[in-house]
């Protein structure tokens, strides 16, 4: 049974179940939301009403994400950034070699001695050395050339240690689809579906 048929059957069963009308209606909407967000909801006109209703409901106090019991779906979660490349660490933009608390981890960082791929210094194109002692370079990650910055670690006052360890940093990639829902497919296997709520 495909995901589409599974959810349609589930929604139909819920609609006809001997439950309280409000509960049945909410479950049916939750299955519609899951079905639409698991595919191209922006390009599917029939998905616009349930998703527009969802977006409007998210603004209301005490909002609870509609779930689909038949698929054991979770509430949606939000992850703004992609994972850093393998071997890189996600850190906050104001962190150097110190662990930071409560900061948005929007930078990927790796120690210079752990970067094995070739590095090309681009003094003209990327600005070369900066006032903080850092410099711009080009590095290759997963077959793509990426602009990066190399800098030395800082002390607690934010001053460069000069001879301290050096790090490469790159902006952490942002997800085009930052929301996700987890659910059980027709075979009982846990799945994760990523989506965005951008209006078509």
Image (cartoon, helix red, strand yellow):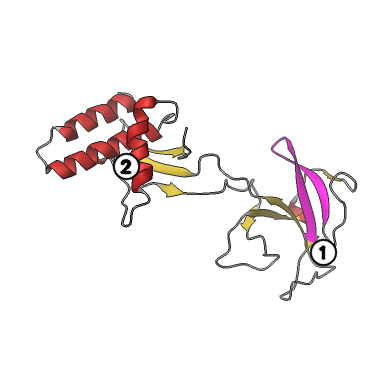
Q: Where's the N terminus, which quadrant?
A: top left
Q: Main secondary structure of the magenta part?
A: strand
Q: Is residue 120 left or right of residue 178?
A: right
Which numbered circle lies on residue 73? 2
Q: Mark 1 — residue?
A: 132
Q: Residue at x 38, y 43 (%)?
A: 55
| Up/down of 91 relative to 126, above or below | below
Q: Earlier in the sequence, mark 1 or mark 2?
A: 2
Does residue 73 appear in this view? Answer: yes
Q: Is residue 59 left or right of residue 171?
A: left
The residue range painted magenta reads 135-151
**Which residue is more in the foreground, 71 or 35?**
35
Q: Residue at x 37, y 49 (%)?
A: 58
Residue 9 location, x and y as percent? 23, 27
Query: Tags 1 and 2 in contact by the CB under 8 Å rule?
Result: no
Asked which secondary structure carries label 2, the reply is loop
**Which residue is more in the foreground, 17 or 163?**
17
Extreme residue in the left direction: 18
**Which residue is more in the foreground, 129 or 182?**
129
Q: Residue at x 13, y 32 (%)?
A: 16
- Is residue 145 inside the magenta stretch? yes
Q: Is residue 7 left or right of residue 174?
A: left
């Amino acid at each position: 049974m495909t995901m589409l048929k599974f959810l349609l059957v589930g929604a139909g069963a819920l609609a006809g179940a001997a439950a309280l009308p409000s509960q049945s209606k909410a479950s049916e909407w939750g299955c519609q939301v899951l079905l639409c967000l698991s595919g191209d909801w922006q390009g599917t006109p029939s998905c616009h009403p349930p998703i527009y209703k969802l977006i409007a409901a998210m603004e209301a106090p005490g909002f609870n994400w509609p779930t689909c019991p038949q698929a054991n779906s979770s509430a949606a979660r939000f992850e703004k950034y992609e994972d850093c490349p393998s071997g890189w660490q996600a850190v906050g933009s104001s962190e150097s070699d110190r662990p930071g608390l409560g900061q948005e981890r929007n930078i990927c960082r790796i120690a210079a001695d752990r970067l094995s791929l070739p590095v090309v210094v681009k003094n003209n194109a990327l600005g070369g050395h900066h006032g903080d002692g850092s410099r711009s370079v080009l590095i290759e990650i997963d077959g793509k050339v990426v602009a990066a910055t190399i800098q030395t670690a800082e002390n607690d006052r934010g001053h460069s240690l000069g001879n301290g360890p050096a790090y490469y940093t790159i902006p952490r990639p942002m997800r085009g689809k930052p929301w996700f829902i987890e659910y059980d497919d027709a075979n009982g296997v846990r799945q994760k579906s990523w989506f965005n709520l951008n209006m078509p």
